[in-house]
Image: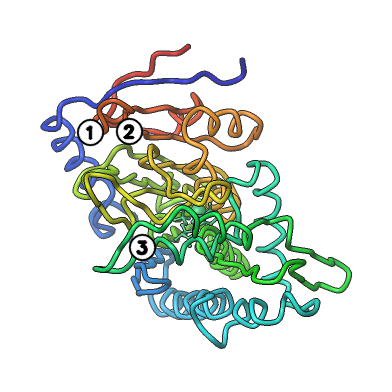
Amino acid sequence: MKRHLAFFSLISPMLTGIFAFFALFLLSPNPDSIYARSEDIFRRDELLMGTVVSIQIVHSDSKTASGLIDRTFSIMKEMVNRMDAHREDSEVSLLNREGAKRPVRVSKELFDVISLALKVSKISDGAFDITVGPLIKLWPVYKRSGFTIPDPSLVQKTLQKVGWQYILLNPQKQTVMFTKEGVSIDLGGIAKGYIVDRAVEFLKSQGVNGALVNAGGDIYALGTAPQGKPWRIGIQHPRDPRKLIAVLELRDLGVVTSGDYERYVIKNGIRYTHIIDPRTGFTVRETASVSVVGKPAAFIDALATAVMVEGAEKGMSLLESLPSVEALIITQDKKNPSELLYTCTPGFLDYTVWRAFSDPKRQ
Ligand code: AMP
Ligand code: MG
């Protein structure tokens, strides 16, 4: 078997805290004291897509670096404006209004994201599906109050408007059409990764050899940090935002984490999260988080969401079929939901320089 499953449990929280503190220290180097004078890290954080987007670039000149960061943010904002289904004037909203009536010619960027999304739908047996929007509206976990569990008959009815097979692409004409009335798209599960890819592509084209772009957990490490060191990236613990679950070293690779803790509501002891199984119409239950390493970021973003839906077992078979990705899946124990189980591809461990769970038992 090419890959092995590995289950292991969390070491004591105290030890985790000490290590997490140590790891955070490693993640926040002071450029003046650690790196050569000629190369510094320049960083800016901005709020975008409802999350903090941070860009760090390695450069020798602060003015040039600042200009490059400005332009990178503009590119990212332009992409967000195109792909945000909640903005009336976005390209996606126009497509959602017109797509069932006629083939709509879209930009190359939107066409590429939709094509990639459909590819992931196919390989994940529909676990990832950008037509999930109508179901998302049934589970308003993003609302502070007024969350009610939808009637199963309403879920069944809504499922009729969901299905990636209803999206018809014409690559020659660069058009998109929905073959069923009521179908629409929501790029929430892939757009952040895509936007990170566009940012990295721009920075590369400008001769930047080292950068770290992070859109709320969708991360790409371009080249190296100063002095040729790999970028160090901490992965958040799914049940305690103050703790890390692992620290990775990456170079020219992305890591994307999808989790049930990003947006959720707890009702009668059950956690209802923002990720939905498009085949059943119900929210994902057992998977707490999925971190996927690979590239491009858009692909691993969609894959992480798909594996959240599929869970550890099916998720692992999906990952096994893809040679160039590695992943960590954290699930809740069925009998004791407060206990977390860790499943990963062995290759994932090669990227970890520290982790909060003990050595894997290989099977
Ligand atoms: P992520 O954080 O990348 O896992 O994306 C979660 C977002 O993707 C949600 O807020 C929804 O907008 C959307 N989404 C939820 N479930 C799915 C799904 N099964 N397939 C595709 N997108 C989804
Ligand atoms: Mg995703």
Q: CA distance from mark 2 to mark 3?
A: 41 Å
**Camera-side residue: 281 or 234?**
281
What residue would you read off at disc 1? 338
Q: Residues within 10 Å of mark 1 (few under 14, many from 20)?
A: few
Q: Nearer the viewer, mark 3 or mark 1?
A: 1
What residue would you read off at disc 2? 332
Amino acid type, callout 1: Ser
Residue 350, given in percent of the width and then of the height, sits at 46, 28
Amino acid type, callout 3: Asp
Residue 10, given in percent of the width and then of the height, sits at 24, 27
Q: Is residue 99 above or below residue 274?
A: below
Question: CB under 8 Å between callouts 1 and 2?
Answer: yes
Residue 25, given in percent of the width and then of the height, sits at 21, 47
Q: Is residue 344 left or right of residue 353?
A: right
Residue lying at the far left of the rendered structure: 14
What residue would you read off at disc 3? 40
N-term mark: 2 or 3: 3
Q: CA distance from mark 3 to mark 1?
A: 42 Å
Q: Is disc 2 placed on a helix, strand or loop?
A: strand
Question: CB under 8 Å between callouts 2 and 3?
Answer: no
- Residue 57, located in which quarter of the rendered image? bottom left
- Location of the N terminus by quadrant is top right
N-term mark: 3 or 1: 3
